[in-house]
Amino acid sequence: MTAPVLEIYLSDADAADALRHDARVGLSAEPKWLPPRWFYDARGSELFEQITMLPEYYPTRTERELLRHTVTQIAARAAVDTLVELGSGSSEKTRLLLDALTATGSLRRFVPLDVSESALRAAMAAVAREYPRLAVHGVVGDFTEHLELLPAAHRGRRLVAFLGGTIGNLLPDDRATFFTALRAALGPDELLLLGAGLVTDPAIMVPAYDDATGVTAEFNRNVLHVLNRELGADFDVSAFDHIALWNATHEWIEMRLQASRAMTVQVPALGMAVHYAQGEQMLTEVSTKFRRAGLGAELQAAGFAEQLWWTDPDDRFALVLAEAS
């Protein structure tokens, strides 16, 4: 077994600087907002794992079953020597891909990219144990900034897997920038495997982000715990209510936190006092749901030509295999 290799392009200091920047900009905006990446400290990641097992939260299990039924076709079509995964390097879905790709005899290396060094090290160690003939090359980085630093394929080509519907968390301009940057980082004929939620009945979509047991509400409020701990803020976390709604104009789910009373929050690390009116809402996440024509056009505009699509029987989720032209 070859020892795993780890490259670090994102340090703890970088993450701290990014948090301060995002908090300063978002908390001074009108309306206020915070980006969803700050949900995911250790507690937030634990809560999200709980969310994926809730009966209301269909995206994870739908994508997993869709991948289970299509992964052999994907592997046969891909025939790559390097699998790059953007996030979620320890998930069951990764194993499905690794099993199918190693069965083709072409796969030589696994390259997981994640912002968390500790999570990445654990994922790399697990994969190295389970797939001893596979070289493991981890990259601590941000998929919105460090795509050009991904290692090249050994002799063949790479497949970049971006699963979980995470693409929906990017706003349209950011999504276009991401697709363009990814295409620029890939060579001709290299591949993207994208998992994306599809537009379906709001009565199905909204409860996935507002479960009856309140786990998603706790997950949403966790971003305030992060600000309290990392920036010395004094948010009364219990004074914020979780809101989830379907924005039909933009075709995305919005998660918000709503102040139940007027208050002023001190954020010492930023030298800020942040005022909230009673009922004021702060946007914490959007989760875009796509239509095939629209997402296909976005990929094509970024330089991904041939596309193969698979959807579940209820048309709630899609896997797209797109080739860089």
Image (cartoon, helix red, strand yellow):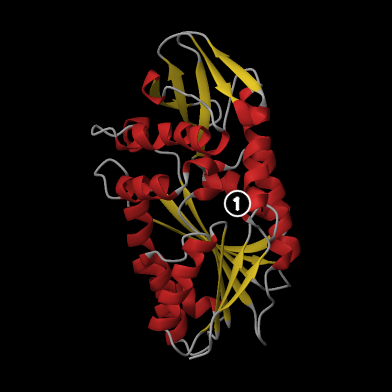
Residue 108 occupies quadrant: bottom right
Q: Residues within 10 Å of mark 1 (few under 14, many from 20)?
A: some
Foreground: 284 or 225?
Answer: 225
Q: Is residue 80 above or below residue 291?
A: below
Foreground: 263 or 93?
Answer: 263
Quadrant housing the C terminus: bottom right
State the image coordinates of residue 181 (x, y, percent, origin top left): 73, 56
Residue 141 occupies quadrant: bottom right
State the image coordinates of residue 235 (x, y, percent, origin top left): 47, 24
Residue 294 occupies quadrant: top right
Tell me what residue is drawn at x 45 percent, y 11 percent. 279
State the image coordinates of residue 310 (x, y, percent, origin top left): 44, 60
The reply to whether residue 228 is in sight is yes
Tell me what residue is drawn at x 44 percent, y 69 percent. 122
Q: Is residue 274 above or below residue 45?
A: above
Numbered marks: total: 1
User: Can you identify the residue that label 1 sits on?
Assistant: 296
Tell me what residue is drawn at x 66 percent, y 72 percent. 190
- Which amino acid type is marked by label 1? Gly
State the image coordinates of residue 113 (x, y, percent, origin top left): 57, 64
Secondary structure at numbered mark 1: helix
Looking at the image, the residue that sits furthest to the right is: 184
The reply to whether residue 314 is in sight is no
In the picture, measured across the screen, residue 238 lies left or right of residue 107, that is left
Foreground: 249 or 240?
Answer: 240
